[in-house]
Image: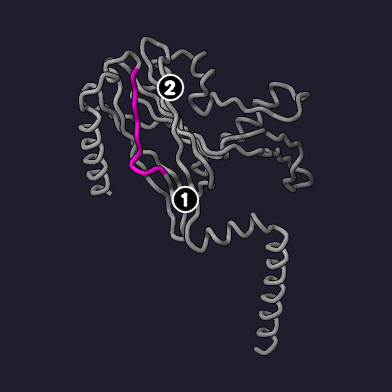
């Protein structure tokens, strides 16, 4: 792990030196540029998480906030109630286009460099996510209760980062940070949004994408399941029946 951090630091400094080559744009107000050590995350059978290095250059006297969002997905949240000594699902709310992954990084705590209004407008921090629902008749208190539960559940499985990671400044213009993707991330396009902050305002924003995808035999199975869903379902049932019959036959012989 230490060796990996040393390598990341060397890469950041090397790329930073390339960024520092004379460029008229680097002197422009609100200038920021970023890059990634790798533009993709490959999911394999042995995948246990991945760490990507993000590095960049910005104007002196500014701060940087980075937000990483996974692909959106309609997500149901259910409330459990105890009935006759048994926990059962009762009410349900479906949130629309919920990010399947969310994390932030910043040179300083976002609340110290931006107002609560701006943080909410740009959805910086899990507490500022704009989670919309399908049913408009639900009260605001109910929405708040269920959205807090959604964020809590996503945080518990490491898909939402409740803590803000540190962006390290190198000299006056360079910065770097590590983006961590846990083993249970979903496939899809992830958006990395970088905000440049000065005097309590966001003066520039730059976005790039990271592709999370399966490789090897896992990719073949995944693509087959999505491209031929009906056939995949039939084969899954056949395999389950054959496996059950085989196990039952072996048990009887024993």
- Left or right of 181? Residue 92 is right
What secondary structure is found at the residue carrying circle 2? strand
Q: Residue 72 lies in what quarter of the image?
A: top right
- The residue labelled by disc 2 is 205
Instruction: Give the quarter of the image for residue 237.
Output: bottom right
Q: Residue at position x 35%, y 30% from top?
A: 34
Q: Which residues are magenta?
A: 31-39
Residue 110, relative to residue 150: is it above or below? above
Residue, x 70% and y 26% (percent of image)? 142
Rendered location of residue 35, percent (x, y): 34, 35
Which of pointers 2 and 1 indicates the residue nearer the eye?
Answer: 2
Q: Position of residue 50 (x, y in %)?
A: 40, 48
Task: Give the CA separation, mark 2 to mark 1.
Answer: 29 Å
| Residue sitting nearer the eye, 46 or 212 | 212
Residue 201 picture quarter: top left
- Left or right, 69 with respect to 131, comes to left
Residue 61 location, x and y as percent? 28, 15
List the single residue furthest toward the bottom. Answer: 253
Q: Tell me the quadrant of the picture where the C terminus can be found.
A: bottom right
Give the residue furthest to the front: 24
Which residue position holds label 1?
183
């Amino acid at each position: 792990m230490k060796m990996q951090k040393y390598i990341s630091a060397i890469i950041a400094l090397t790329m930073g030196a390339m960024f520092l080559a004379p460029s008229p744009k680097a002197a422009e107000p609100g200038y920021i540029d970023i890059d990634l050590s790798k533009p993709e995350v490959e999911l394999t059978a042995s995948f246990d998480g991945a760490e990507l290095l993000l590095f960049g250059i910005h104007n002196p006297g500014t701060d940087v906030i980075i937000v990483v969002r996974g692909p959106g997905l309609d997500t149901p949240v259910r409330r459990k109630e105890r009935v006759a000594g048994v926990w059962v699902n009762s009410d349900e709310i479906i949130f629309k286009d919920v990010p399947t992954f969310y994390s932030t990084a910043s040179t300083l705590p976002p609340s110290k460099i931006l107002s609560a209004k701006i943080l909410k407008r740009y959805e910086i921090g899990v507490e500022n996510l704009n989670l919309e629902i399908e049913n408009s008749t639900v009260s605001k208190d109910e929405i708040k209760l269920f959205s807090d539960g959604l964020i809590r559940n996503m945080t518990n499985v490491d898909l939402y980062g409740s803590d803000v990671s540190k962006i390290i400044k190198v000299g006056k213009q360079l910065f770097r940070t590590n983006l961590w993707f846990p083993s249970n991330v979903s496939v899809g396009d992830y958006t990395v949004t970088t905000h440049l902050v000065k005097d309590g305002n966001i003066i520039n924003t730059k976005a790039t994408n990271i592709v999370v995808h399966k490789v090897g035999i896992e990719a073949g199975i995944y693509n087959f399941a999505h491209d031929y869903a009906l056939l995949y379902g039939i084969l899954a049932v056949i395999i389950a029946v054959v496996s059950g019959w085989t196990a039952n036959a072996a048990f009887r012989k024993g």
